[in-house]
């Protein structure tokens, strides 16, 4: 076993284009992985069970990925043990997981069987009201996120006008030679997806340990607007695919299908990270051999100056929209906490703990 460490990520989040999940990168059945899928409502102990397993794994010096819930980062959506090719995951809405190869690669564990339905039914009116209110707050947050997406797209149109492609391409040619050299593998490329950051009830959150791979080289791309940094990251991603390399890509929580926050290339021990006003310096404090890339040289400053007032307005509106998104997610979380209290009062946690102990034993002995 390697030295103990864990990393924190998200695998699903609300975005400017709707809810986006990369839970299909949670485990790989055809490569011998096994997933324990937890079912049950809020307050049934899914997250607590996973935290208990993760803590035991830490004691056993097992490398762990903690997958947090973007709607409540205190809570876990999954834990992944890559060394063991095992994961445990919350398989309920909105990131529903159903077995692909039942009994072979997955096992369902229903924690809902440990609740007292009579107690829940006594609180049916309150629960239904709270659950409906929860939907309402999440819907409002999604509407504001859509508006934020529109602002960002308008901003990007201006920035694309200011981009200077010849300078950029000359730079990328040199960078590719430095990073990749003559590397070319005779295998299929493999990409893993993770989120380092998400929009949460506490605001924009980024996990400072998520990129702590102890790389030999770290490129920090300083980009206020994330337009050039994304182009650099996408080019690196494409080049690694052409060379049949492994890569971990980190989409942004705004446009995850076509915008990246970072990429990690394990075979050349190199990380590229986009740094903007939201990515705090803590993300970089544990990284060594940092090389900075300033993207202002790839943007025509005269064009930017001519749109300065509009870009400033876009930033102001974006900030206000982010506040509204956060406020509604926070209200949804407060409601969720009330819902959990009712479910917790109806749960038999002795049985949940017994299930957790059995699961810990099964994972550590790799005997499903």
Image (spheres, rainbow, N blue to C red):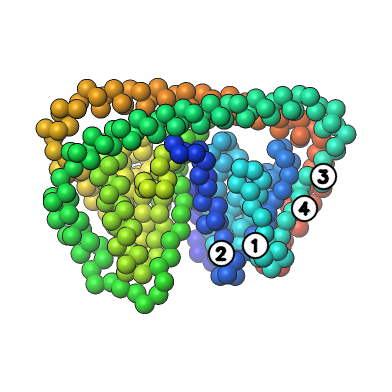
**For residue 28, which numbered disc appears in the image?**
2
In space, the residues marked 2 and 4 are separated at their CA atoms by 24 Å
Eye-nearest disc, 3 or 1: 1
- Disc 3 designates what residue? 114
User: Pointer 3 and pointer 1: residues touching (CB < 8 Å)?
Assistant: no
Query: Please, which residue is most extreme toward the bottom here?
Result: 186
Residue, disc 1: 100
Where disc 1 sits, the SS reads: loop
Picture layout, residue 150 above or below residue 180: above
- Between disc 1 and disc 2, the foreground one is 1
Describe residue 41's horizontal placement relative to residue 302 as left or right: right
Q: Residues within 10 Å of mark 1 (few under 14, many from 20)?
A: few
Separation of marks 4 and 1 at Cα, in angstroms: 23 Å
Whole-Å distance between the Cαs marked 3 and 1?
25 Å
Mark 4 or mark 3: which comes first in sequence? Answer: 3
Q: Position of residue 366 (x, y in %)?
A: 67, 67
């Amino acid at each position: 076993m390697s030295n103990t460490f864990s990393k924190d990520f998200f695998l699903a989040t609300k975005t400017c284009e709707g809810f986006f999940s990369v839970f299909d990168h949670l485990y790989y059945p055809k490569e011998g992985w096994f997933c324990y899928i937890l079912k049950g409502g809020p307050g049934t102990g899914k997250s607590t069970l996973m935290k208990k397993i993760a803590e035991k794994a830490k004691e056993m010096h097992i490398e762990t990925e903690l997958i947090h819930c973007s709607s409540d980062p205190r809570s876990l959506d999954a834990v992944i043990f890559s060394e063991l090719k095992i994961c445990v995951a919350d398989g309920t809405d909105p990131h529903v997981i159903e077995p692909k190869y039942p009994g072979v690669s997955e096992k369902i564990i229903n924690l809902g069987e440990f609740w007292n339905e009579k107690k829940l039914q006594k609180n049916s009116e309150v629960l239904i009201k709270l659950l409906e209110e929860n939907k309402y707050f999440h819907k409002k947050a999604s509407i504001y996120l859509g508006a934020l997406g529109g602002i960002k797209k308008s901003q990007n149109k201006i920035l694309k006008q200011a981009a200077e492609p010849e300078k950029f391409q000359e730079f990328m040619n040199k960078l590719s030679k430095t990073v990749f050299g003559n590397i070319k593998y005779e295998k299929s490329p493999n990409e893993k997806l993770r989120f380092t950051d998400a929009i949460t009830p506490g605001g924009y959150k980024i996990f400072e340990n998520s990129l702590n791979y102890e790389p030999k080289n770290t490129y920090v791309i300083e980009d206020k607007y994330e337009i050039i940094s994304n182009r650099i990251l996408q080019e690196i991603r494409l080049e690694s695919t052409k060379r049949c390399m492994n890569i971990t890509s980190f989409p942004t929580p705004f446009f995850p299908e076509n915008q990246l926050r970072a990429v990690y290339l394990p075979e050349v021990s190199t990380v590229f990270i986009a740094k903007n006003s939201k990515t705090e310096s803590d993300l970089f404090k544990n990284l060594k051999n940092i090389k900075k890339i300033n993207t202002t040289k790839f943007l025509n400053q005269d064009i930017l100056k001519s749109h300065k007032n509009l870009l400033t307005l876009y930033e102001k509106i974006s900030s206000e929209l982010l506040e509204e998104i956060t406020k509604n997610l926070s209200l949804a979380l407060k409601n969720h906490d009330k819902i959990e209290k009712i479910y917790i009062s109806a749960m038999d946690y002795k049985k949940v703990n017994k299930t957790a102990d059995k699961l810990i034993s099964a994972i550590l002995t790799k005997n499903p």
